[in-house]
Image (cartoon, rainbow, N blue to C red):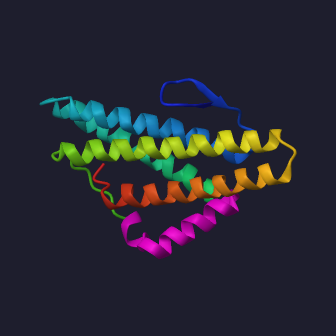
Amino acid sequence: MSYTTMGQPQGVSVYYTNKIRESMVSEIVAINKYVKHILTSGNFKDIQEVLETILEDEIRHYNMYFDLLRKYDSAQMKAYEAVKQDYTMDRLLNRRQYNFDNTEVVLELNKLRLDSKGELEAVILYEYNMNAVKPLDIKHAYLTIINDEKRHLEDLTYLINKYGVV
């Protein structure tokens, strides 16, 4: 089941790639919660260190799911290749540093991750709806929009990696 940011059901996963998307949504929610907790943990350095370790795992989980999504969804891989070419993402993907000093950047990254969550949820909903209709022109419209949403996810991922201090 896919959920909006308000927790309301939004569609049903039909494809196994959408099961992966739902898992990515869960990781985004976890990442944002840990980032907010770290930002508000004040002078508790021991708490921050443990939360940063957990955060690293959540980010690794998200990236593992994303790798699988690109592997099993050819349209997602095509979108990734286009963004990679457009933005030379390779040099950014291997860079990971944690810096919670710039709260504005950290909160902006949380917003970008929520935007990514919305794109993932949209694909799940639209693929579910596409399977429920018969007219080919409606199916084609859904497929066009689905592929746009996949590109949006890659664009947002580029920005997250570009500003990805957390």
Residue extending farthest to the left is 43
Q: Examine the image and state in which quarter residue 157 appears.
A: bottom left
Q: Which residue is drawn at 32% across and 55% down?
A: 164
Q: What stretch is highlighted in magenta?
A: 71-93
Along the line of sight, the residue nearer the viewer: 99 or 2: 2
Residue shown at the point (26%, 50%) measured from the top left: 98
Q: In this view, does 92 lie above or below 39?
A: below
The N terminus, quarter of image: top right
Identified at 58% across, 65% down, the residue is 79
Residue 62 visible to an observer of this rendering:
yes
Residue 133: percent from the left, percent from the top? 83, 41
Q: Is residue 3 left or right of residue 39?
A: right
Residue 149 position, x and y percent, is: 58, 53
Say above or below: 58 vs 37.
below
Q: How many marks?
A: 0
Q: Which residue is drawn at 43% across and 34% down?
A: 30
- Please check the rendered image and state whether residue 91 is part of the magenta-colored stretch, yes or no: yes
Q: Position of residue 97 (x, y in %)?
A: 27, 55
Image quarter of residue 53 = top left
**Residue 58 appearing in the image:** no
In this picture, residue 58 sits left or right of residue 17: left
Q: Main secondary structure of the magenta part?
A: helix
Q: In this view, does 128 lie to the left or right of 77?
A: right
Q: Does 88 sit above or below residue 139?
A: below
Q: Which of 17 and 112 is in front in this view?
A: 112
Residue 143, magenta (yes or no): no
Residue farthest right in this picture: 134
